[in-house]
Amino acid sequence: MIHLIKLAVGVRDFAHLAALQASRATAGQPLRYQTRNLPKRADELCDGGSLYWVIGGIVQARQKILGVESATREDGTRCAVLLLDPVPVQVAGHAKKAFQGWRYLEPAEAPPDLAAAGGAQAAEMPEDMRRALVGLGLL
């Protein structure tokens, strides 16, 4: 199993990501995310992997990868489509510098789900407070 990590460009916080993904999801269908490059480790991604989202410089969410498909864009170029669980899961974030595209993320480096990390209190904190505490390494 392996994960991917990607910047969520234009997303303000976890609630904004959840709202965007809910609006994009078709009832009963996996959410489709298009990317230029087909992951060479697609089989490992589909074996329990997730797409982790970096929001505002902090890894804040993940979505389970349900499948990876090869596709063709309207302009004829090839691309990959990641089929995602439409419901994002909040994770116990850590700071992450900006990068382009997506990167593989080893399971040992992936942050735990916020609920599993005993983060019920952190989940109820205002977003700015949680972000500041993560930036200081206190969460």
Image: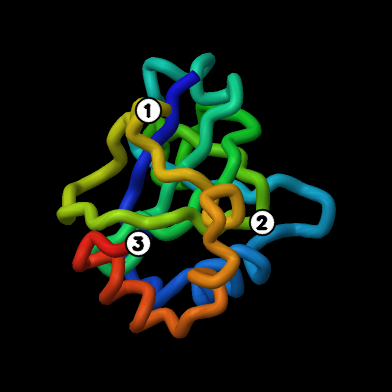
Taking the spot 37% from the left edge, 28% from the top edge, the residue there is 108
Task: Residue 103: name its quadrant.
Answer: top left
Task: Residue 35: name its quadrant.
Answer: top left
Describe residue 110's horizontal placement relative to residue 121 as left or right. left
In this rendering, the label closer to the viewer, 1 or 3:
3
> Which secondary structure, mark 1?
helix
Taking the spot 38% from the left edge, 16% from the top edge, the residue there is 40
Taking the spot 55% from the left edge, 71% from the top edge, the residue there is 121
Q: Which amino acid does label 2 sit on?
A: Val
**Residues at marks 3 and 2, CA–CA distance in whole angstroms:** 23 Å
Query: Where does label 3 land, which residue?
Result: 139
Pick whichever of labels 3 and 2 is earlier in the sequence. 2
Disc 3 residue crowd, few under 14, some 14–19, many 20+, Cα 10 Å: some
Q: Give residue 55's position: percent from left, percent from top.
A: 34, 64
Pick whichever of labels 1 and 3 is earlier in the sequence. 1
The mark found on residue 87 in the picture is 2
Taking the spot 29% from the left edge, 71% from the top edge, the residue there is 133
Which is more toward the observer, 83 or 89? Answer: 89
Query: Where does label 1 land, which residue?
Result: 108
Describe residue 30's horizontal placement relative to residue 16 as left or right. right
Q: Is residue 48 above or below residue 52?
A: above
Which is more toward the observer, 2 or 129? Answer: 129
